[in-house]
Every structure is written in structure tokens, then in C-alpha cells.
Amino acid sequence: MTTPGMLTKEDEAIRQVLASLEQQIEHMVTAGRTVERIKEEIAGGYISGASSEFQRKVEDWMTRYQQVIGAFERFVQSTQGANAILTQAEDDARAHAADGIYNGLQGA
């Protein structure tokens, strides 16, 4: 049971979310590499105005896709940072509670 207004942290849920996000980033990087490979194959085999325009659009897409991957990576880092802060706060709260119990037992 939690007190209303109290923040609770579910370590396993956070680990699962982080693992899912990291796996998603891996899939995104793989997809980006596949698109890059296809673009290079097209560049090597097709020389035309249409091919050049297509390659330019693919490069633009890749640039924007890298920005999305970067945003996902920053989100993961922020979530890891927030988790570390919450974990430290929990540890500090336990230490202070233990100090209070110890001091109470000592009659301080």
C-alpha cells in the first residue's frame, strides 16, 4: 500500500522499458544501414536525373532518420538518468529512515 502522493518506482518495469527502447534503436540502426546500402547500390548502377533525385531524397530521409535515432538515444539516456536519481533518492531515504530508527533505539 502506498501513501497518496508518494512516488513509487518499479525497477523491473523500468528495466523492461529501457531494454525495449535499446532494442528498438538497434532495429532502427539496422534499417538505416539497409537503406544506405540500397542507396549505394542504386548510385553504382543507375546514372540519371531520376536516380540522382531519388538518391537526394534518400539522403534527406537518412539525415532525418538519424535525428530520430538520436532523439531515441537521448530519451534512453534521460530515462537511465532519471532511474539513477530515483534509485539514489530511495537509498538516501532508506538510510535516513534507518538512522532515525537507530537513533530512536539509542534514546537520542
Image (cartoon, rainbow, N blue to C red):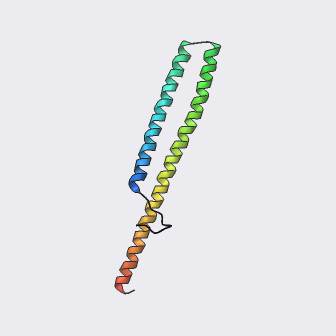
Residue drawn at point x = 41 percent, y = 52 percent: 13
Residue 97, image x, y percentages: 40, 74
> Which picture quadrant has residue 71?
top right
Find residue 8 and report its horizontal and vertical position in percent: 45, 62
Kindly give the residue lying farthest to the left in the view shown: 105
Query: In this picture, is 95 found above or below 26?
Result: below
Examine the rendered structure and indicate whether residue 24 appears above or below residue 9: above
- The residue drawn where x is 62% and y is 25% is 57
Q: Nearer the viewer, residue 10 or 5?
A: 5
**The N terminus sits in image quarter:** bottom left
Q: Nearer the viewer, residue 1 or 32?
A: 1
Q: Is residue 103 left or right of residue 38?
A: left
Is 9 located above or below residue 62 in the figure? below
Q: Residue at x 48, y 63 (%)?
A: 7
Q: Nearer the viewer, residue 7 or 84?
A: 7
On the image, the x and y values in percent for residue 86 come to: 46, 60
Specify the quadrant that holds the C terminus.
bottom left
Residue at 56% across / 34% down in the picture? 65
Task: Look at the picture and state if 42 lies above or below 24.
Answer: above
Residue 31 image offset from top left, x and y in percent: 48, 30
Numbered disc total: 0
Q: Is residue 84 left or right of residue 54?
A: left
